[in-house]
Amino acid sequence: MATLPNPLPKLATDPSGRSLGLRLPPGRLVDETDEGLWHEPLLWHAEKASAPGTWKALGAPAARTGLLPVLVDLAGCRVGVEDWALLPGKASYPGDHDVADVLAEYWKEETDGHVSDEIAPFDAEWPGLAPAGVLSADPDTRAAQVADALHSDPEAWAEWVEEPHLALVPARRSADIPAAIGWAGPLNYEADVARVSAVLRSWEDRFGIRVVALGLDALVVSVAAPPGTVTDAEVLAAEHYALCPNTVAQSGPGSIEAYAEELVGATSWSFWWD
């Protein structure tokens, strides 16, 4: 996958990040993958769990150096993100994938040509992409708000993220973070996580999303331009179902139609794969 120059190696000799204009807490560089050591660090993450305000205090300044913030859930990890079995060698480049084609393929595979109550009000024909939302906040400001909410109300977010640590990833845009580190969360559903990042890129453009948190198999994004009507939300809900059916069928209300109502005005979306 094509990436920008990686500032992370500087942290090997300057762990405080001062040479990058940062003041980082103790942390660790991760270059260990499920395929062996990567040729350069994939990410840095703090050793201690983060707190409200961490995203704004550390993540925002880091973004100006080409290191984008994301919270990583290290609950249950013996070492760190290495326990996730990262697979950067299997990730292509998100820009090489057309989002409409990717989602239409997922929809076809999931519905298998059958109509069910789960995909109501749609049928087996892919409904296409939802129209863009209208920004109700600056996307980076909204990301910081969602990150703080995740810390301030841990019980509400425990299903998705239990022990968030701030991480910094060299990536062109927030949507590319999963592909940049070779995140294997959706591996049982999609072997090339860059196709997931291609969808996230489109959501960045249409809905002002930012990737706020990653777990072993969970993803949380902030949303700065959510759909304003149920009609628009239903088409978007079909996109969510195509990318991650669990969001509707298991952790959601059981149908696209019902799930769409939850998307109107929502400032965050959460996904998990198994």
Image: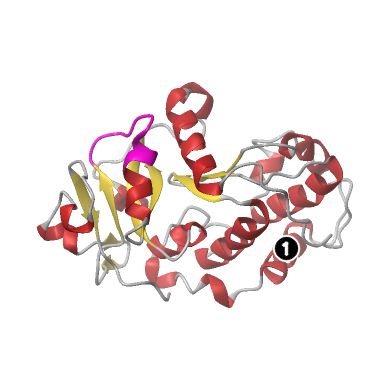
Color style of the picture: secondary structure
Quarter of the image that includes the N terminus: bottom left
Q: Looking at the picture, tell me which residue is in the foreground, 118 or 196.
A: 196
Three-letter residue code for mark 1? Glu
At horizontal 66% and vertical 38% (from top left) the residue drawn is 250
Horizontal and vertical percent for residue 170?
Answer: 35, 62
The answer to whether 61 appears left or right of 11 in the picture is right
At horizontal 56% and vertical 46% (from top left) the residue drawn is 138
Instruction: Inspect this view and state whether residue 75 appears.
Output: no
Q: Looking at the picture, tell me which residue is in the foreground, 272 or 3.
A: 3
Q: Looking at the picture, tell me which residue is in the foreground, 3 or 66.
A: 66
| Segment tinted magenta in the rendering | 47-57
Whether residue 2 is in magenta: the answer is: no
Query: Furthest residue to the left?
Result: 13
Whether residue 52 is in magenta: the answer is: yes
- Magenta stretch: dominant SS? loop
**Crowd class of label 1 (few under 14; some 14 to 19; many from 20; radius 10 Å):** few
Horizontal and vertical percent for residue 8?
Answer: 24, 61
At horizontal 31% and vertical 43% (from top left) the residue drawn is 58
User: Residue 248 appears in which quarter of the rendering?
Assistant: top right
Could you tell me which secondary element the residue under label 1 belongs to?
Answer: helix
Instruction: Inspect this view and state whether residue 27 appears.
Output: yes
User: Residue 88 appears in which quarter of the rendering?
Assistant: bottom left
Q: Looking at the picture, tell me which residue is in the foreground, 93 or 108.
A: 93
Horizontal and vertical percent for residue 213?
Answer: 46, 44
- Numbered-mark total: 1
The answer to whether 94 appears left or right of 20 in the picture is right
The answer to whether 245 appears left or right of 47 in the picture is right
Write down the residue under mark 1. Answer: 109
The answer to whether 213 appears left or right of 54 in the picture is right
Horizontal and vertical percent for residue 71?
Answer: 40, 43
